[in-house]
Amino acid sequence: MIEHNKKDIDKLTESIEDYLEMIYLHHRDTNEGVRLTDIAEGMGVKKASATDAVRRLKEKGFVDHERYGRIFLTPEGERVAIAVYDKHVTITRYIHEILHVDAATAEEDACCIEHVISSETFEQMKKALEEKSKA
């Protein structure tokens, strides 16, 4: 079970959370650093916006990036990215499995909800999914 430090995640903007999640998913799938161009394309933004986001992530200690090099999550960045991703997956599962909303809509809704949900509500979602799994 992933432990979430609400304080860590609350300090992040929606955009930063989305960038961390995208970098994490790329790293998880390829096990190599991410190119700035891939981040811009994946996020649907211009390269300048991705550059600014990576700079902010680096300032916060979430990524390592040398000019013109690939971007890698730091251990702290990976920890936070995994927590953000776990929140996304859990909310998606809850909406789909408990509320019986179609998978595509559940995914879309989770993308919005994950940034504003309280820790209390999120923990109750996790409990409901655990109880469903035991039944």
Image (tube, helix red, strand yellow):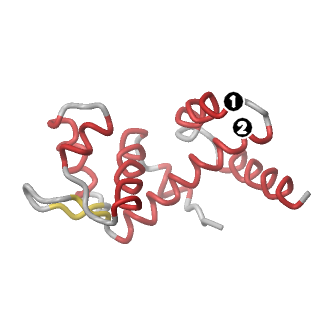
**Residue drawn 78% across the image and 52% down it:** 129
The crowd level at tag 1 (other Cα within 10 Å; few <14, some 14-19, many 20+) is few
Relative placement, left or right, of 55 versus 75 is left
**Residue drawn 33% across the image and 66% down it:** 31
Label 2 sits on what residue type?
His
For mark 2, give the secondary structure.
Answer: helix
Taking depth in this image into account, of 60 and 84 the one nearest to the observer is 84
Q: Do the residues labelled 1 and 2 touch (CB within 8 Å)?
A: yes
Q: Which of marks 1 and 2 is nearer the N terminus?
A: 2
Q: Residue 126: x percent and y percent?
A: 73, 53
Q: Residue 65: x percent and y percent?
A: 17, 61
Q: Residue 46: x percent and y percent?
A: 19, 31
Q: Which residue lies furthest to the right in this view?
A: 135
Mark 1 — residue? 102
Q: How far apart are marks 1 and 2 (CA)?
A: 6 Å
Mark 2 — residue? 96
Label 1 sits on what residue type?
Asp
